[in-house]
């Protein structure tokens, strides 16, 4: 595998992690996931209805995509830990995308509850991928607790506002010893490319694809955006200059 | 016996194990997690964990999200 994404004990060729929420139906979701090229995709854990499962696991299985359970909707460390343990039994995975949200209006992570949950889950043997604020100090603390990656937001969930503080993302990348996954806020492919140019190891997104007018086309765009940004990051961009510099010889 | 499943009263056989309870509820066991009275039951214990009469049971599965 050329230039794989390495998180914990796994390797992925794709650097795009997808979500499954917000899509009209499973057929549209399946086409979008296939077009994205993703190999790791989040699901949520909820009460079963009388008919049992929702069918999303069967879609992931058909496409050979690893499910990544999240703790979406949890407000406290205790809720998130319980949800992660239920997910482990339901899906047979000790990987968890840890989300502990402060309030419904901003959906911003609650850093106090997040740290507490991460500590408990790491001690319980989980591979923890925490959704965190774009706070370089908090990201470092999560890494020190033993998280396998850190997932700072570009902007709040579902806003499509892109990366509001690129410098903070660069600061997180500069000090991180674990992969940095830009998570939330991506609206279009150029923003996914920017995340990779800033040095992120991967991008996680859902809304930008699932609520796009054409989810399959946007998923394709995101796949190329992530790949382009990764290549550009490694290629060594030219310095920015104030004055023009001719690229053709003078005569 | 009667138990609470996801907040609803349901009747299942007396002394049912978690596996037998899921069968009685017609819930496919694949991709499902069960908590009995607030404690997660490991998948490997579904066959030997007996659900107490009047228990509060949560049955969860993966859905679209994130």
Image (cartoon, coloured by chain):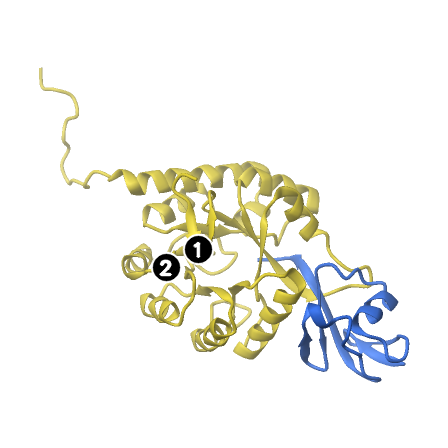
**Which disc, if any, is residue A7?**
1
Q: Which residue is mark 2?
A: A178
Residue at 36% across / 42% down in the picture?
A230
Picture quadrant of residue B14: bottom right
Q: Residue at x 70, y 49 (%)?
A: A58
Q: What residue is shown at x 47% (from left), y 43% (from top)?
A: A14
Helix, strand, or loop for circle 1?
Answer: strand
Residue A188's tag is: none
The color chain B is rendered in? blue
Closer to the camera in the image, A147 or A110: A147
Q: CA distance from mark 2 to mark 1?
A: 8 Å
Residue A11 screen position, x and y as percent: 46, 49
Which percent across, then down, holds residue A130? 46, 65
Asked if residue A117 is positioned above or below residue A147 in the image, the reply reads below
Same chain, marks 2 and 1?
Answer: yes
Residues at circles 2 and 1 in contact by the CB criterion of under 8 Å: yes
Label 2 resides on the chain identified as A
Which quadrant holds the C terminus of chain A? top left
- Residue A193 sits in quarter: top left
For marks 2 and 1 on the same chain, the one whose residue lies earlier in the sequence: 1
For mark 2, does the 10 Å Cα neighbourhood hold few (<14), some (14 to 19), or many (20 or more) residues?
Answer: many
Residue located at (75% from left, 58% from top) = A53
- Which x, y percent locates residue A51? 82, 59
Q: Is residue A172 left or right of residue A28?
A: left
Q: Is residue A121 visible?
A: yes
The chain that appears yellow in the image is: A
Q: Is residue A213 visible?
A: no
**From the image, which quarter does the N terminus of chain A lie in?**
top left
């Amino acid at each position: 595998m050329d230039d794989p994404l390495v998180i914990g004990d796994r390797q992925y060729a794709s650097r795009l992690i997808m979500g499954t929420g917000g899509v009209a139906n499973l057929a549209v979701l399946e086409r979008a996931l296939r077009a994205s090229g993703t190999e790791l995709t989040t699901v949520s854990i909820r009460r079963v209805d009388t008919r049992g499962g929702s069918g999303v696991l069967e879609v992931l299985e058909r496409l050979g995509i690893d499910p990544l359970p999240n703790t979406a909707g949890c407000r406290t460390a205790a809720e998130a830990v319980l949800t992660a343990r239920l997910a482990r039994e339901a899906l047979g995975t000790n990987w968890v995308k840890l989300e502990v949200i402060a309030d419904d209006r901003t959906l911003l992570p609650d850093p106090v509850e997040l740290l507490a949950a991460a500590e408990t889950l790491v001690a319980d043997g989980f591979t923890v991928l925490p959704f965190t604020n774009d706070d370089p100090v908090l990201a470092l603390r999560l890494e020190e607790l033993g998280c396998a990656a850190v997932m700072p937001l570009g902007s709040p969930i579902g806003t499509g506002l892109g990366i509001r503080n690129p410098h903070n993302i660069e600061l997180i990348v500069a000090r991180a010893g674990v992969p940095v996954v830009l998570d939330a806020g991506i609206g279009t492919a150029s923003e996914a490319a920017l995340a990779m140019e800033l040095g992120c190891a991967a991008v996680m997104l859902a809304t930008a694809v699932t609520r796009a007018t054409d989810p399959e086309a946007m998923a394709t765009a995101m796949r190329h955006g992530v790949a382009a940004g990764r290549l550009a990051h490694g290629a060594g961009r030219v310095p920015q200059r104030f004055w023009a510099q001719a690229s053709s010889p003078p005569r | 016996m009667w138990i609470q499943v996801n907040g609803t009263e349901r009747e299942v056989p007396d002394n049912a194990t978690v596996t037998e309870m899921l069968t009685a509820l017609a819930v496919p066991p694949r991709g499902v997690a069960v908590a009995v009275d607030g404690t997660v039951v490991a998948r490997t214990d579904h066959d030997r964990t007996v659900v107490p009469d009047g228990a509060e049971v949560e049955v969860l599965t993966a859905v679209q999200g994130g």
